[in-house]
Amino acid sequence: MVPQASTDSSAPAEAFWHAVRSGWLPLRQCASCGVSFVVPLPACPSCAGADLVVTKARGTGTVYSWVVAHHAFDPVLADAVPYIAALINLDEGARVYARLVDVADRDLVAGLPVQWSASASRVADRPLLVFRPTQPTEQR
């Protein structure tokens, strides 16, 4: 039988966004199976273990995949259309969806090194996960 996670999912989410607003990217690691993840879940998405260790992610990684959004799926991003939504492979092994800035869609490639940007992670007083290339794309 799979252990049941807590039904109060608001506490991990509140702690996650508080950390992001404070300038650090929380990384959760399951003490049972070792899986790392960023999503603020109350239990491990792999084994449902509830013994999670939260650490500060380095915030570096590479672009795994992306899409250029021509419609604002969140009203907060209406003025940013078109924008890039990317799936980032963090160096610690977790994947996270985030907005990608400071790169033209024509310069995107899988494996592009990126860094989490705490300073760009607020839109309309709401925290967002935002990454940018670690070096200007024209230098590649």
Image: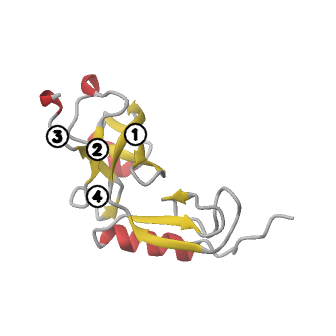
Residue drawn 37% across the image and 72% down it: 19
Residue tagged by mark 3?
135
**Residue 110, horizontal then vertical, whole percent:** 37, 30
Dot 4: within a 10 Å radius of its alpha carbon, few (fewer than 14), some, or many (20 or more) residues? some
Give whichever of discs 1 and 3 has the lower sequence position. 1
Comes first in the chain, label 2 or label 3: 2
Amino acid marked by disc 4: Ser
Q: Tell me the mark number nearer the camera, choosing from 1 and 3.
A: 3
**Identity of the amino acid at label 3?**
Gln
Other-residue count near label 3 (Cα within 10 Å), few / some / many at <14 / 14–19 / ≥20: some
For the point 48% across and 59% down, the residue is: 38
Numbered label attached to residue 121: 4
Label total for image: 4
Mark 3 vs mark 4: which is more N-terminal?
4
Circles 2 and 3 in contact, beta carbons < 8 Å = no
Residue for point 41% across, 33% down: 66
What is the secondary structure assignment of the residue under circle 2?
strand
Q: What is the spatial separation of the Cα atoms under label 4 and label 2, in whole angstroms?
A: 14 Å
Q: Nearer the viewer, mark 4 or mark 2?
A: 2
Which residue is under mark 1? 86
**Mark 1 residue crowding within 10 angstroms, few (<14) / some (14–19) / many (20+):** many
- Find the distance from the CA under tag 4 to the CA under tag 1: 14 Å
Mark 3: which secondary structure? loop
**Circle 2 sits on which residue?**
114
Which of the 4 quarters of the picture holds residue 17? bottom left
Q: Which corner quadrant holds the C terminus?
A: top left
Label 1 amino acid? Answer: Ala
Q: What x and y, as percent, mark residue 31?
A: 60, 70
Q: How far apart are the two marked residues, 2 and 3, measured between alpha carbons?
A: 8 Å
